[in-house]
Image: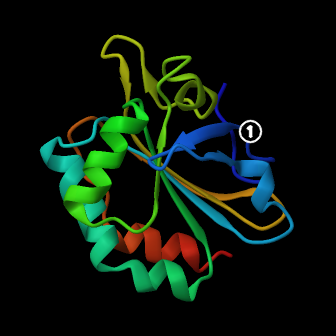
Amino acid sequence: MSVAVGEKAPKFTLTNQHGEEVSLASFEGKKPVVLVFYPLSFSGTCTGELCEIRDNISMFQSADVELLAISVDSKFTQAKFAEDQGYSFSLLADFWPHGAVSELYDVFLEDKGHGTRGTFVINAAGVLVAKFITSPGEARDLNSYKKALELL
């Protein structure tokens, strides 16, 4: 079941790279959220995409959004990935139940055991205002983020 633009975003709680629980509901009524689902930490395309976000973090900061990157990797993998790449945003572990949040957002690839690249822009009211999903192996374009942030 895929969430559609205009609908409430499915709520979840996951652990970040610091071992802290992060709940989507905690941002509702406070600030918009951008969810960036990616297949696997340390893979080439994923690293490139998240480094591009890191290098353009001001775009997200000026929109006052909470940026949450999500993969099926463990919190330990997320911690090492964030440290090695200098990510200042949260990397969430959709590790167990394996891919459950990715499934909620219809980006889990059952046959591969990980998610595909999906981005979901959620306003402060908890409503999805934009989403874009790319095929496996296809990187997202930074301009897609810029256009989506304009909808907030």
Please identify the residue farthest to the left as the structure is shown: 44
Note whether 54 is above or below 130 in the view shown. below
Note whether 40 is above or below 68 in the view shown. above
Mark 1 is on which residue type? Pro
Percent x, y of residue 76: 36, 37
Residue appearing at x 52%, y 83% in the figure: 61
Percent x, y of residue 65: 61, 73
Residue appearing at x 79%, y 50% in the figure: 25
Note whether 92 is above or below 102 in the view shown. below
Which image quarter holds the N terminus? Answer: top right
Which image quarter holds the C terminus? Answer: bottom right
Residue appearing at x 59%, y 83% in the figure: 63
Q: Is residue 149 left or right of residue 138?
A: right
Q: How is the image coloured?
A: rainbow
Q: Find disc 1 in the rendering and name its residue.
A: 10
Q: Nearer the viewer, residue 65 or 106?
A: 65
Q: Nearer the viewer, residue 21 or 102?
A: 21
Q: Nearer the viewer, residue 65 or 7?
A: 65
Q: Nearer the viewer, residue 76 or 63?
A: 76
Number of numbered callouts drawn: 1
Percent x, y of residue 101: 59, 30
Residue appearing at x 31%, y 57% in the figure: 140
Q: Secondary structure at mark 1?
A: loop
Which corner quadrant of the image does residue 4 belong to?
top right
Residue density around tag 1, few if under 14, some if 14–19, many if 20 or more, within 10 Å? some
